[in-house]
Image (spheres, grey):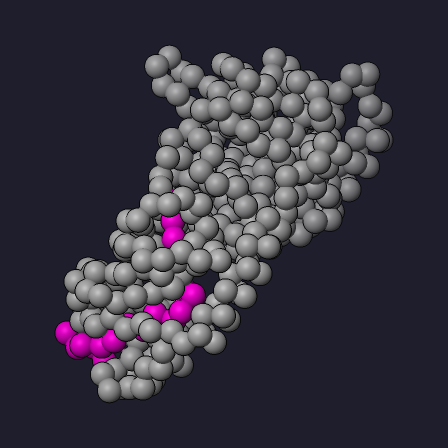
Amino acid sequence: MLDANAEAGIRMGASREQGTHSTQGHPSDEDCVAEFVGATKRFGAVLAADRINLRIRRGEFLSFLGPSGCGKTTALRMLAGFESPSDGTVRIDGQDVSRVPAYARPVNMVFQHYALFPHMTVAQNIGYGLRQVRPKLAKSEIAARVDAALAKVRLDAFGARRTWELSGGQQQRVALARAIINEPKLLLLDEPMAALDAKLRGEMQRELLDLQRSLGITFVLVTHDQEEALSMSDRICIMGAGRIAQVGTPQDLYDRPRNRYVADFVGKANILNGEVLSRDAGLARIALAGGAQVLVPDTAGDTRRHVEIAVRPEALRLAVPGEALGGDAMLRARITHRTFLGDHTEYLMQADDIGPLQVNVPRQAERALGGQGVGDQVHILWTAGTGLVLAADE
């Protein structure tokens, strides 16, 4: 049970969090570079995108994130002009472009496999779009802009090379240079790092962020890699079944997922069932199976009695039997798996009356456990204010 001072502190923290929930609010007309208004796309009987409403802020890095078949690529293709919405509209700078062909939009796209021309040099690939401009640009102007684009992606000395002579990371930079040379209002990226190894992918993510910040162009990324989206995005749009499940900053989505779908997809989460005993000032007192009571923020906005709670594995603590536990809620559990991952250890637990739980323990904190291993009994400590009541999935 919690004392009155602890409850008061949690309420103050919950109030602050509710006040900062929309750290980047709905873009104004002036800030908005592109917008989906009730955009729906059907392929025969398949509903690929279902009434998407989304404003994209000028100069932001926005990611569409979700599993295969969730509608994220369809949304990107409607923005690019490769698909037209069956219903609704797509706007760029306030203009309805729903029926405007891709080549006539102020948009460029970097594809997953880059789509470079193998018979052209790097410089020729980058300058291809400029050579299509009418009226024609002077060769000297094209050459100067190609040199500038090569410098931006740090390939100054590679202009005369063929694309097949480059590494995967260098090819990606050529594709980026070709996409930015026409100075588009939107740069669309369709999983451009999926083919790279983990180390190179991390390097390219940082380079892409640096490039986006220096150019000030709005980047829109499609990815199924949650780590990629969390590390790069100003905002993330979580997609599921053709619909937007939630839009927010990476921290918003991680700390305050709206429902089970988002909590499961962004990071790892323990999802527990509980019964609401009371609600007050944005907090709910929940009884878990086995009788343990926890006090958690309640942003679901409904009056359900039986709810689901999400709690992140790193928000829980482990303690050996007999350790002073203070005012935290306690769950008894048995270790079923222990996986050392360098900076932390992942414990899979079987908690009495509740079921499986995951707890991530930082390396230094683990030393206090005294070498507990598979089969050992421990206590899981749930600090007051940890977790979140989830809204019902739509």
Residue drawn at x 62%, y 33% as measured from the top left: 55
Q: Nearer the viewer, residue 278 or 150?
A: 278
Residue 267 image offset from top left, x and y in percent:
40, 54
Relative to residue 295, is residue 236 depicted above or below?
A: above
- The residue located at (42%, 39%) in the rendering is 66
Report the side of 2 relative to 185 (left or right): left
In the picture, which quadrant includes the N terminus? bottom left
Expressed as whole percent of the image width and height from the top left, the position of residue 98 reads: 60, 16
Nearer to me, 301 or 50:
301
Q: In this figure, what is the number of numbered marks?
A: 0
Q: Is residue 299 above or below residue 11?
A: above
70 relative position to 53: left or right: left
- The answer to whether residue 29 is left or right of residue 337 is right
- x and y percentages locating residue 324 in the rendered image: 31, 86
Q: Which residues are magenta?
A: 372-391
Q: Is residue 45 above or below residue 303?
A: above
Residue 71 is a magenta residue: no
